[in-house]
Image: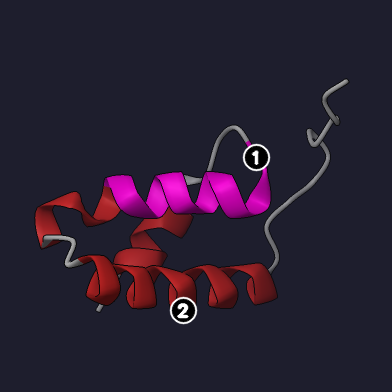
């Protein structure tokens, strides 16, 4: 049975980890800048196990 993560949020620490993982992934996988937002969204969903990621968090992750 799937776990209920509806009450789970993304902490500042989670965001730092996500941003670091995102940056490493972009370099290793040679992801183009136009694909960054989608990649950040997918990566954040996978790592947090949340269905929806706040768009502001995605923007922060991809910010230079």
Label 2 secondary element: helix
Magenta residues, as a range? 38-50
Q: Residue 42: x percent and y percent?
A: 43, 44
Residue, disc 1: 50
* Number of the label disc, if any, that sits on residue 20: 2
Circle 2 residues within 10 Å: few <14, some 14–19, many ≥20 = few
Question: Which residue sits furthest front?
Answer: 28
Residue depicted at 68% across the width and 57% down the height = 10
Q: Is residue 32 left or right of residue 55?
A: left
* Number of the label disc, if any, that sits on residue 26: none
Q: How far apart are marks 2 and 1 (CA)?
A: 18 Å
Confirm or deny contact between disc 2 and disc 1 (CB under 8 A): no
Q: Residue 11: x percent and y percent?
A: 70, 66
Where is residue 23, by image quadrant? bottom left
Q: In this view, does 59 lie to the left or right of 9?
A: left
Residue depicted at 35% across the width and 69% down the height = 25
Where is residue 56, by image quadrant? bottom left
Residue depicted at 61% across the width and 54% down the height = 47
Q: Does the magenta stretch include residue 5?
A: no
């Amino acid at each position: 049975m799937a776990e209920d993560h509806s009450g789970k949020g993304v902490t500042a620490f989670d965001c730092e980890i996500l941003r670091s993982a995102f940056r490493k992934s972009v370099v290793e996988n040679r992801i183009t800048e136009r694909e960054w937002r989608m990649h950040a969204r997918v990566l954040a969903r996978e790592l947090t196990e949340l269905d929806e990621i706040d768009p502001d968090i995605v923007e922060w992750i991809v910010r230079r």
